[in-house]
Amino acid sequence: MDLGLSLNIATGGLKTIENELSTVSENVTNASTPGYVSETSTVSSVVVAGKGIGSQIGNTHLTLSQPLQNALYNQTAKVAGLTATNNSLSALSAVQGTTSGSDGSHTIGTLSDNLQNIATSLISLTGTPYNSAAQEKVISSATTLLNNIHTLSSVYQTQRQGAQNSITDTVSSINKDLTTIGQVSQKIMLAKSSHVNTADLENKRLEIMSDLSSKLGVTFSEKPNGDMVVSTQDGLRLPTRPDQIGQQDDTLSLPSTTWPLGTSAATLSPSMYHATDGSDKGVPDITLNGKDITKHLTDGTLGANIALRDNIYPRMQAQLDSFSYALIKRFQTAGLPLFDNGSSQKFTADLTKTAPDGLVGLSSSISLSQKYQNTPSLLTTDQQGNTGVTNMATQVINQINTPTNGKDGLEAPSDGLGPDGAQSTGYLGTLSLSQLATSLTTNQAGIISDTSNDLTTATSIQTSLSTKVANISGVDVNSQMAAVIALKNSYTANAKVVSAVQSMFTALVDAIH
């Protein structure tokens, strides 16, 4: 082997090792970066006429299992969505009441408990109808129940508004992620067309994809030219650059927080809802090119907050409004109109009309009749002015504990509820007041419990997938450091060859002179 070839092989080896060291350094630096995939340098031998004349550096590639990576993205969206839902519902859990006893059968502070306290105070009143303390106890128990109803309604509205606020913020963040993916993809396409290494750019895009998947359930597919196609879980394509939908990229400054998705902020009330027919009912659409795509956006924090805003809390509100209606109506029918709609307007059973003259939001306006607050003795005074009368109290106790027959007009509305008429309670309206209260609390507590359990399961699956992905794509710092030692030894060996060849060249020159 001549000295020139030896020098060429050794210096080429040094350059190759420097490239591999750079890759190892990049891996170690980003070992804890979410979504980062381990990079591997490509090195190949250069052979001419059957003789090795050195090595050449190829493009760095990512160690990636696409099916596993996609599964992790999907699971990340599920966990993020369930986490957002669980966090929101925890505020409701805090005001629903508590349980005691090893079997959890004894409840304190629930709607049913507060309703039974009214029944208990009425039973006491029937024994001492002239006792002012017994009368005041009924008023006090009724006030506690009303406070419970108002608190629940307030939580529904506060958390629903919180979901709306989160939607506005998350849409802006999703836009930034989408358009950053588009921007990076453009650089990848340009690099690929020039046969330039794209591993670092691809890793940057993977990090953004990981972030996006926590906000929205999406799928990713890469084109042969390096471009990235992002779609919702049901296949609706979300553009990442204007050119993907036939527009000029220079029409938009990337990345953007206002494109491609659009929405607006809003202050919500129980009468507002998201209409799917294009009409404006107060709850803003999420649009793409002016078209409402809200129904396509699922999972992730965005999908969870849409469900909370448009389904979960409206249904809970409808359940409580229905209970409030039954409470007012059945007490009135028993001859003891202790509760009213908080207004001089006529109380009606219009299911989609807003309170006080309708059912929507009634649980916010339901009040304790002012005349009973001012004169508690009216609790045992009949319409003819007779005092010490207890049959109204007895009738109310019966309404609290006995189901209706479904033919007396006292059935609690169970379908066609909410301002859009799309909500239902999920249980019979003929139940007794106590059973209605229990069913409401049980139904809503079940949603809270199911969400918590689903989150635990989903997180476990996510952890398992993350481990599998890390085993394939993650950075093993120990193996990377071992590689550094091996590369250092190789570098030293090549450096010695270079030094030896240089010494030989010097000796040869000296011999000639």
Image (spheres, rainbow, N blue to C red):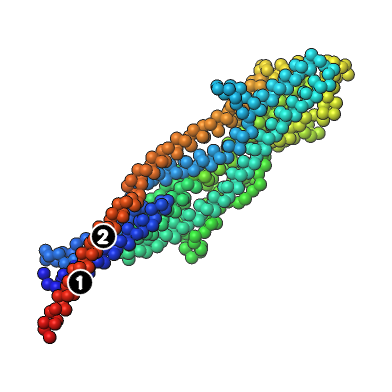
Label 2: few (<14), some (14–19) or many (≥20) C-alpha neighbours in 10 Å: some
Residue at 11%, 69% (x, y): give it.
1
**Residue 4 percent coordinates (x, y):** 16, 73
- Which residue type does callout 1 highlight? Ser
Query: In this picture, is 156 found above or below 439?
Result: below
Residue at 76%, 17% (x, y): give it.
124
Query: In this picture, is 332 found above or below 350?
Result: above
Relative side of 116 to 101, left or right: right
Relative side of 149 to 85, left or right: right
Relative side of 300 to 19, left or right: right
* Disc 1: which residue: 499
Mark yes or no: residue 454 visible: yes
Relative side of 192 to 287, left or right: left
* Disc 2: which residue: 487
- Residue 115, by quadrant, is top right
**Residue 193 percent coordinates (x, y):** 33, 64
Label 1: few (<14), some (14–19) or many (≥20) C-alpha neighbours in 10 Å: some
- Which residue type does callout 2 highlight? Leu
**Residue 307 percent coordinates (x, y):** 55, 40
Mark yes or no: residue 360 visible: no
Residue 58 vs residue 357, the one in the foreground: 58
**Residue 448 percent coordinates (x, y):** 55, 33
Residue 487 vs residue 153, the one in the foreground: 487
Which quadrant does the C terminus fall into?
A: bottom left
